[in-house]
Amino acid sequence: MTQIDCFISTVSPYVYLAGTRLEDIASRNGATVRYIPVDPAALFARTGGLMLKDRHESRKAYRLQELRRWSVKTGLKLNPQPMFWPVNPAPSAYAVIAAIKAGGGDLAGLIHGFGVALWAKERDIADPDVIADILATYGYDPKIADRYMLAAAETYMANLEEAVAQGAFGLPFYIVGEEKFWGQDRLDDLDLHLQGRL
């Protein structure tokens, strides 16, 4: 069975705007998805990218236009300047890693749920109570983030090394074998590739 390696960050607006489309694409094409949470700042630093605060004003302005357009296209509410932003990505990433280790629950829903909380509901996804609530909402024990914290931190660092080694440089980033697709706006191309048409 084909595996899609999906490098993500729970704080990325583009991961949020991808929704759960990847799961639909994988299901249609008989593929599996492996979610790999990565620290965006560390990934950008290792691969030549810039964090938002360090980008030129023209890039910042274009980003706001793109977020607005994709919010309309996907039907997903998005506040481009949410109350809790920037936010530490590590706590929610650890929760996703813990959920992967624990199994069960709705993993794609959980990842999307963090995006909804941050970008549409003005919630602080670094807050332990918010994390516990989101975990419970998607069928996970709300205490797994605490239980797996040390292992999750180690995995988070290892994930960064894997992302760099595989050639990922932005988020979301999808890899199928040697084929790479950067951004939620490449999901249609990924779909065509899995169909053998691209």
Image (cartoon, grey):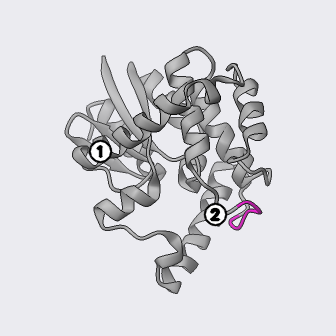
Q: SS class of the residue under badge 2?
A: loop
Cβ atoms at labels 2 and 1 below 8 Å apart = no
Q: Residue at x 53, y 85 (%)?
A: 57
User: Which quarter of the picture shows residue 189?
Assistant: top left
- Does residue 9 appear to the left or right of 42 in the view shown? right
Nearer to me, 61 or 153: 153
Q: Residue at x 78, y 50 (%)?
A: 123
Inspect the magenta stretch and tell me whether residue 81 lies in it.
yes
Depth check: give the residue in front, 18 or 139. 139
92 vs 162, left or right, is right
Q: Amino acid at mark 1?
A: Glu
Side (left or right) of 63 relative to 141: left
Quadrant location of the N terminus in the rendered image: top left
Magenta stretch, residue numbers: 80-84
Q: Residues within 10 Å of mark 2 (few under 14, many from 20)?
A: few
Quickly name the residue at label 1: 161
Dominant SS in magenta: loop
> Which residue is rendered at x = 41% and y = 70% of the image?
50
In the rendered image, which residue does mark 2 sit on? 86
CA–CA distance between discs 2 and 1? 24 Å
